[in-house]
Amino acid sequence: MEEELLDLTPAKKTFSRIGFSLTALTLIGALLQAAVIYFLNCADLLENSTWFWLGTFLPLYLVAIPCCVAMLRKLPAETPEEHALGTGNAVTFFLIGCFLMYAGNLIGTMLSMLLSGGTAENAVAGLAMDSNPLKILFVVILAPVLEEFLFRKQLIDRTRRYGEKTAVLLSALTFGLLHQNLFQFFYAFGLGLIFAYIYLRTGRLRYTVVYHGIINFMGSVLAPWILSLYDLDAMAAIDPNAPAEELLALYADILPGMLIVCGYALVLVGLSIAGLVLFIIKVRRLIWKEGSAQLPHGTAAKTVYANAGMVIYMLLCLLAIILTLI
């Protein structure tokens, strides 16, 4: 059937506007961040991590995201019906999220190292190790609320009528690309799929906000704190030729932290394995509903992604990703 007969023009315009909205978010955020960071650097304020956190996140949260949402609001929206998630599903999705988070992190790290020849640096890891209290405000509270509001509610509500699979994939892909580095892309994409599906089935954004907050807390607060309990420098500085009494005293100081780190790692492995098993089971039972303006079979990819707005957004994010690997 010819594309003209399918009348996909309105759908293409919708997805193109979404792409331009996300492009505006990316460019406005980057330009304002650069301007603010430059000003703070000139004022010799960047040595204070508080100013760095404020300069990095406030332009994004106070200006860029609101501008993006304002552009999206001109598109018609269909909110999913509200349903309770249920305790069993809540636990299942949490475990699946653990698997996707750590598997995605492993894939992203290995691929970044491979493509960069081992020179790529994970800038997010540095932020995660910062002990500034603003980290909790921005990463654990504001990021989940604002990002879920944009990538789940705003995008899902405006695309689910074209098919739930289409809406979920778009939400996850654009969310992953927004991070603009391979270290985060794969786990952000995987978690984006889970969060989008949860929002579709429940119509309640609070579920995904809580999940997002827990995931960010685990990665940026809990994990760095646990790792800080194990003194790697002290371990490397141990002289094996030192007297036995001195070695025993040194190992006694290091051992508790080492046991905690190892125990935490084993817990994560266990949660991830359980998540993998549940993922295999759950993915076969997923229910997908057709939308009120369901895209005909074979037209979704071209309609959703082959338009000016989405092409520009994806190219912009890919360029940013490539720059992190050089």
Image: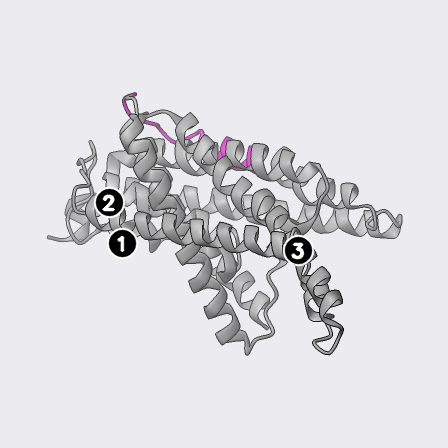
Name the outermost residue toward the right. 43
Q: Tell me the residue at 69%/37% (across/down).
A: 134
Query: Could you tell me if the residues under marks 3 and 2 are in contact, i.e. CB atoms within 8 Å?
Result: no
Front-lying residue, 301 or 85: 85
Disc 1 marks which residue? 301
Q: What residue type is disc 1 on? A: Ala
> Do we see residue 308 in this rendering?
no
Q: Is residue 246 magenta?
A: no
- Please report contact status of discs 1 and 3: CB closer than 8 Å, yes or no: no
Task: Kindly report which numbered mark, 1 or 3, lies closer to the viewer in this rendering.
Answer: 3
User: Rounded to the nearest whole Å, what is the CA distance between mark 2 and mark 1?
Assistant: 12 Å
Coordinates of residue 116 in the picture (x, y in percent): 54, 75
Residue placed furthest toward the left: 1
Element type where label 1 sits in the image = helix
* SS state under label 3: helix
| Colour theme | one colour
The residue singled out by tag 3 in the image is: 126
- Tell me, for residue 60, which label it has, or none: none
Q: CA distance from mark 3 to mark 2?
A: 45 Å
- Kindly identify the residue that appears in the image at 71 percent across and 44 percent down: 131
The kind of residue on which mark 3 rests is Gly
Q: Which residues are magenta?
A: 63-82
Residue 86 in which image quadrant: top left
Q: Earlier in the sequence, mark 3 or mark 2?
A: 2
Within 10 Å of disc 3 (Cα), the crowding (few <14, some 14-19, many 20+) is: few
Q: Residues within 10 Å of mark 2 (few under 14, many from 20)?
A: some
Nearest the viewer among 205 and 87 is 87
Decide which of tag 1 and tag 3 comes sooner along the chain: 3
In the rendering, which numbered label is found on residue 8?
A: 2
Residue 48 location, x and y as percent? Answer: 82, 46
